[in-house]
Every structure is written in C-alpha cells, then in structure tokens.
Amino acid sequence: MELILWRHAEAEPGEPDALRELTPKGQRHAARMGAWLDRKLPPACRILVSPATRCIQTVEALGRRYEVVEALGTESSAEAIIDACGWPEHRQPVLIVGHQPLLGQVASMVLCGDKQDWRIRKAGVFWIEHKEPEGAPYIRLVAGPDVIGKLR
C-alpha cells in the first residue's frame, strides 16, 4: 500500500476555522503540487479529504475525484485517519489531504509505531510505501512545493 499525506496549502487566518480559504500563495502552491501529484499518482488512487474549506480547495487543484471524510477533520486523531484509509491492508494507494499536527502524527505512527508531532510543511507531501506484509514501511518522498517546482 502507498499512503500519501498532503497537507493543505497556506490559508487565510480567521474564524470559523473550518471555513478558512487558501491565500493567493496557497492557491499557487496547491496548483503546483496538484499538477505534480496528478502526474505521479497511480490512476486507481483513492483520494480522501478533510471537510475543511482549505483542504477541499487544495485537493481541487489536483483535478481528480475525491471523497470528503469527516474522520480527517481538524478535531480527529491520527488513529482515526489511519483507520479511515485502511493502512496497511488496503490494496489501493490512498492520498489523504488534511491538517497538522495530525498528518505528522500519522506519518510517525505508520513508520515508528509511536505518535510524535512530526512537521509537514504547508502544501507538502509525505509519501510512504509498504510492499510486503512482513516488511517495514519506508519513506518514498518528502517534499514541499518549492522542491516540486524544481522536479519538473
């Protein structure tokens, strides 16, 4: 299974938190990462998104069908996100578009078995792969929009 964690791009400050929209910079970064991810993601990739406006705006830059999942919201937990995506048993790759510190906690739990507050940059991607049931998951890629712009 492949687990791709994509943190939402930069959002405007304000309340209510769930309705915050992307800044112009956030829109540019989402577009850059979305275009890159669209070229790299497997065609059968499931795309699960937090219901927060900034996450939906981020994933829309990808241009693929997605599912809004309440378990990925800001008040969720790393354990709930892992359950929602079916890690590591699900056969299809999954892209999760969500929030910090939750995505960093998911990455640390999947890779180390321990919940830690790893930081994923805004609009950044943390790509984890697990090929064998008895093997250990590994990091395939960690990158932000500044690096992706240079990988074209």
Image (cartoon, rainbow, N blue to C red):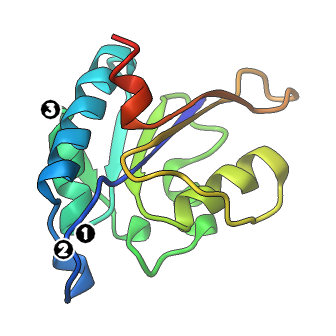
Residue drawn at point x = 23 percent, y = 24 percent: 35
Q: Name the image quarter holding residue 16.
A: bottom left
Disc marking residue 100 = none
Q: Is residue 152 above or below residue 75?
A: above
Residue 113: quadrant of the picture = bottom right
Secondary element type, mark 3: loop
Callout 2–callout 1 Cβ contact below 8 Å: yes
Quadrant of the image containing the C terminus: top left
Q: Which residue is mark 1?
A: 52
> Hey, which quadrant is residue 141 in on the image?
top right
Q: Is residue 145 above or below residue 100?
A: above
In x, y percent, where is residue 22? Answer: 17, 60
Mark in front: 2 vs 1: 2
Q: Secondary structure at mark 1?
A: loop
User: As displayed, is residue 75 above or below residue 104?
Assistant: below
Q: Is residue 85 left or right of residue 36?
A: right
Q: Residue furthest right?
A: 134
Q: Determine the CA span between mark 3 and mark 2.
A: 21 Å
At horizontal 85% and vertical 26% (from top left) the residue drawn is 135
| Residue ID for mark 3 | 63
* Amino acid type assigned to the residue bearing label 2 in the image: Arg
Q: In the rendered structure, which amino acid carries the disc numbered 3?
A: Gly
C-alpha span from label 2 to label 1:
8 Å
In the rendered view, does 38 fall on the left or right side of 123? left
Residue furthest to the bottom: 15
Residue 138 place in picture, x, y as percent:
74, 29
Residue sitting nearer the eye, 65 or 9: 9
Residue at 80% x, 29% y is: 133
